[in-house]
DNA sequence: CGCTCAAAAGTTTTT
DNA sequence: CTTTTGAGCG
């Protein structure tokens, strides 16, 4: 997602690629454009390697080049390479880039590029019978899991969620049932697992947990995967969890295997999900022969943004680790607002002003502040980031009021919302009637009457996915045909590319994530959480809600958040910006049913005054209260 | 069983 | 300030 503008290095002419095998397989043009540090990382010989790379240093690009180099110049067969990405979107993107680098279809066939989950899912499909499931098992999503647990144990929603979390933790840290110390949890775990098996289900965590389980119990299966890949490359390694790390170790048990990891410990933001940055920081200890590469030249951010954001992660201590920016940069705007509404209004007005406003001379514009109106010419150049989704409401309203089109990323995808969710549930059930949980759920939700259930299998027989979905809509959703017409159309549109492969469609639905919906080609502003912004970049970024309570998040004392991780979150957010960065906060905010008067975030205090331009936004007057102005 | 209305609860980030 | 849940009624 680097929008294809990769660096021209000042050193690139000085470097020679004196590689032996390159004659035989042909040189790779992309390597010429890398800078010195990137090139060294790409040309790493063999054995383990860690690439520590700051924001905008071309991590993903370096990884792509490494794969292309292995295939093209080292003659490594693509089926011997496994590349792991963080999202399905990133996998898709990487494959696309590799296709561009290595034209010719045959070169990439057999190459595995996927998320850990999609990789594990493939293993589950192949060996489902070892785990007491059919080939057509379904995936239970996190929401369904809570309902299943609630009904299975007769719990309240909240307690069911807690139990679900315990089970999740067990799976994400890969504890075998015998290793569960708490007797009560153990029995819940066992009953839950029995229920899944009975309904021919796996949960999402099983995509890692069950393959690992299989590897540990069934040597014949392990032998199929052990050393199957000569090169395993992992992007965003700072955010992997224990189960994922153990998966890698199962695939490549040797300490000196060619495991190539790339990431940035300062951008670790998924600790709440079991990710542990220590897998990255301890990599050299665990692999004594590993080479370490550092990428310090950022091709995205300005020096100024790097200097300011660096304060979040207090890396100023190590002078040598300072990143080098693309250019000097312009000051960061820090906007104080009276309320959350005026904050949203400020953002909308600013975007409007930059993109469509009159190009008159502004009194306070000088060279050192840049010229936003010239640098930015598309709505897709803007990102509005927030800590929690609830902040989005006010911003959405303001953008709508100003008729600014936007895409919400990380939102529950439309296919997870009614009535599409139910359409897909019927499709899912018609593919696999063993799913008793789904059967009960469909009847309970009155999506379908019990007597009609037996006719479902016919729906999907020898039909394209689109045809099946159309049949389901015609038969069970005819009443909603008008009000939900758009969603139905969107669904039918989406199914088309899957042809008759309805199972593949289900995989897409089950493993797809919110972040996958981001489309950089749309002419609109991007509204998303800081988490979803990982790996992306924009010329102009707004980070809203820079307040105590929101960032760092601490609205509920019982759920303490990791302050260091919150700092890194702001670091990630700030470093999404190529040139213009707005940090905004409100003195009054209405959130989660409460009025608050938060103090501005302590994180802002760390940024030197000279890097900042302060703005006090005008208070936003609601339309109906404007009369007051004249009284 | 299905509707209405009032009281109560809700607590982040996601592959 | 929502959204969800439960009691009470037709
Ligand atoms: Mg990346």
Image (cartoon, coloured by chain):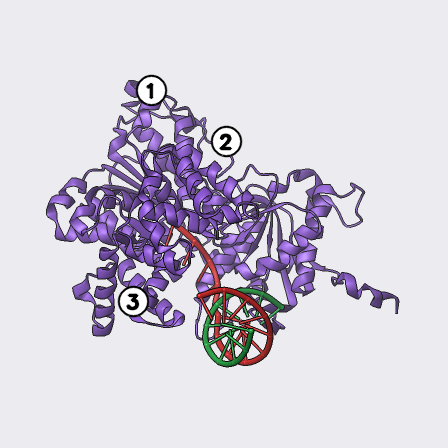
Chain colours: A purple, B red, C green
Quadrant assignment, res A203 = bottom left
Q: Which residue was labeled with disc 3?
A: A152
Q: Quadrant of the C terminus of chain A?
A: bottom right
Quadrant assignment, res A143 = bottom left
Q: CA distance from mark 2 to mark 3?
A: 60 Å
Question: Who's the residue at 27% across and 46% down the image?
Answer: A120
- Cβ at disc 2 under 8 Å from ligand 1: no
Of the four image quadrants, the one with ligand 1 is: top left
* Foreground label between 1 and 2: 1
* Foreground of the two, A359 or A603: A359
Question: Who's the residue at 48% across and 39% down the image?
Answer: A1
* Foreground label between 2 and 3: 3
- The image shows residue A35 at horizontal and vertical percentages of 44, 34
- Compared with residue A89, is residue A583 higher up or lower down, i.e. above or below? below
Q: Which residue was labeled with disc 2?
A: A8
* Foreground of the two, A60 or A319: A60
């Amino acid at each position: 997602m680097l929008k294809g503008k990769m660096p021209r290095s000042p050193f690139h002419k000085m470097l020679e690629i004196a590689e032996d095998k390159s004659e035989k397989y042909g040189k790779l043009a992309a390597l010429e454009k890398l800078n010195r540090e990137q090139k060294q990382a790409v040309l790493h010989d063999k054995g383990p390697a860690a690439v520590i790379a700051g924001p905008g240093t071309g991590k993903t690009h370096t990884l792509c080049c490494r794969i292309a180099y292995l295939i093209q110049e080292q003659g490594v067969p693509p089926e011997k390479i496994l590349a792991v990405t963080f999202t399905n979107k990133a996998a898709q993107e990487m494959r696309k880039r590799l296709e561009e680098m290595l034209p010719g279809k045959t070169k990439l066939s057999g190459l595995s590029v996927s998320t850990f989950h999609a990789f594990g899912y493939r293993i589950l499909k192949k060996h489902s019978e070892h785990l007491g499931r059919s080939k057509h098992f379904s995936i239970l999503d996190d929401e369904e899991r809570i309902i299943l647990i609630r009904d299975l144990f007769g719990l309240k929603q909240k307690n069911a969620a807690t139990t679900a979390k315990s089970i999740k933790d067990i799976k994400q840290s890969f504890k075998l049932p015998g290793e569960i110390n708490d007797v009560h949890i153990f029995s819940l775990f066992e009953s839950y697992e029995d229920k899944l098996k009975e309904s021919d289900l796996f949960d999402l965590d099983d995509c890692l947990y069950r393959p690992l389980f299989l590897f540990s119990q069934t040597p014949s299966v392990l032998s199929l995967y052990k050393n199957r890949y000569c090169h395993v490359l992992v992007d965003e390694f700072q955010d992997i969890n224990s189960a994922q790390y153990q998966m890698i170790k199962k695939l490549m048990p040797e300490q000196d295997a060619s495991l190539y990891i790339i990431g940035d410990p300062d951008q670790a933001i998924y600790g709440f999900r079991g990710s542990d940055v220590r897998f990255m920081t301890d990599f050299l200890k665990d692999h004594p022969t590993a080479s370490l590469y550092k990428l310090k030249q950022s091709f995205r951010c300005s020096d100024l943004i790097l200097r300011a954001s660096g304060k979040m992660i207090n890396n100023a201590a190590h002078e040598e680790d300072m990143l080098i920016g693309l250019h000097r940069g312009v000051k960061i705007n820090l906007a104080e607002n009276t309320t959350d509404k005026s904050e949203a209004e400020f953002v909308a007005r600013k975007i409007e002003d930059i993109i469509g406003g009159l190009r008159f001379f502004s009194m306070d514009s000088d060279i050192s502040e840049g010229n936003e109106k010239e640098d930015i010419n598309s709505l897709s150049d803007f990102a509005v980031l927030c800590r929690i989704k609830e902040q989005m409401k006010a911003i959405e309203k303001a953008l709508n009021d100003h008729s600014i089109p936007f895409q919400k990323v990380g939102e529950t995808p439309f296919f997870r919302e009614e009535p599409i969710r139910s359409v897909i549930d019927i499709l899912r059930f018609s593919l696999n009637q063993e799913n008793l949980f789904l059967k009960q759920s469909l009847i309970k939700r009155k999506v379908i009457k019990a007597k009609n259930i037996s006719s479902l299998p016919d729906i999907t027989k020898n039909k394209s996915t689109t045809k099946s979905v159309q049949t389901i809509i015609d038969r069970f959703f005819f009443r909603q045909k008008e009000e939900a017409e758009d969603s139905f159309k969107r669904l039918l549109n989406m199914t088309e590319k899957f042809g008759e492969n309805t199972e593949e469609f289900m995989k897409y639905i089950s493993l797809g994530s919110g972040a996958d919906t981001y489309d950089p080609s749309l002419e609109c502003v991007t509204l998303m959480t800081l988490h979803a912004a990982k790996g992306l970049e924009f010329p102009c970024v707004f980070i809203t809600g820079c307040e105590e309570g929101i960032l760092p998040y601490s609205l509920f004392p019982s759920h303490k958040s990791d302050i260091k991780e919150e700092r890194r979150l702001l670091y990630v957010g700030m470093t999404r910006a190529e040139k213009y960065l707005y940090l905004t906060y409100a003195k009054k905010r209405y959130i989660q049913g409460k009025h608050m008067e938060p103090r501005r975030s302590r994180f802002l205090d760390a940024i030197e005054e000279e890097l900042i331009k302060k703005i006090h936004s005008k208070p936003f007057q609601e339309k109906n209260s404007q009369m007051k102005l004249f009284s």
